[in-house]
Amino acid sequence: MNGEDDMKLVKPTISMKEEFLDYLKECVDEHGSEKNVTPYAVCLFGKSYEEWLDMTYRFETEPDSGLVPASTYLLVDDSDRVLGAINIRHELNEYLKKVGGHIGYGIRPSERQKGYATKMLEMALPIAKELGIERALITCDKDNVASAKTIINNSGVLENEIEVDGKITQRYWIYSP
């Protein structure tokens, strides 16, 4: 890959199956299980890729009970290697207002610290605006310095820190461009 200009955000497709599964395996290997992978929306939890893909598209308009509509995008390079994933929640429920926010994202472990998360979030903000999100809430654990830097690099402003289940969550707001 030649640089950030060679990256794009795309919705997952059936033809991306092997690249996606490779990305997810690397993330799971780092965390030990899917339940710790970010964004949570990329986890299969026993589903086939095809079932996950159908669910991902259905969630854009018809989420399961208790969840909100959301769109999932993959960050790919010019060879269609999946570098990361980002999930844009179209609205917030009470839980997301506290700790989840509008946008969750993650970069595959072998591609971190290259500025990709900052670029991916930058590319996602206009999509959020198209969905009617003028001001996006983005949260991270207080000890996740890399994520905080990603948010701040995209003009995120810290509103506050809250404690939920013994963890401190930082809550940032970003105006969509």
Image (cartoon, helix red, strand yellow):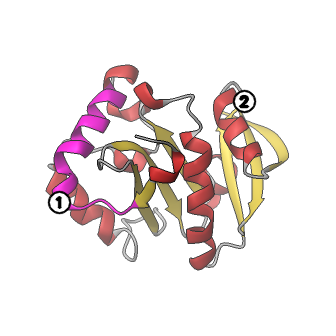
**On screen, residue 142 above or below 60:** above
Taking the magenta stretch, the answer to whether it contains residue 16 is yes
Q: Amino acid at mark 2?
A: Lys
Q: Quadrant of the C terminus?
A: bottom right
**Residue under label 1:** 14
How far separated are the C-alphas under marks 1 and 2? Answer: 36 Å
Taking the magenta stretch, the answer to whether it contains residue 170 is no
Residue 122 visible, this angle: yes
Q: Quadrant of the N terminus?
A: top left
Q: Find the magenta span and give its range.
A: 10-28
Residue 165 visible, this angle: no
Q: Residue at x 61, y 64 (%)?
A: 92
Asked which quadrant contains residue 50, the reply is: bottom left
**Residue under label 2:** 142
Nearer mark to the viewer, of 1 and 2: 1
Q: Position of residue 101 (x, y in %)?
A: 63, 54
Asked which quadrant contains residue 133, the reply is: bottom right
| Left or right of 69 on screen, residue 118 | right
**On screen, residue 131 above or below 83:** below
Predominant secondary structure in magenta?
helix
Q: Residue at x 45, y 51 (%)?
A: 6
| Secondary element at tag 2 | loop
Q: Residue at x 32, y 62 (%)?
A: 56
Circle nearer the N terminus (1, 2): 1
**On screen, residue 159 above or below 10:** above
Q: Amino acid at mark 1?
A: Ile
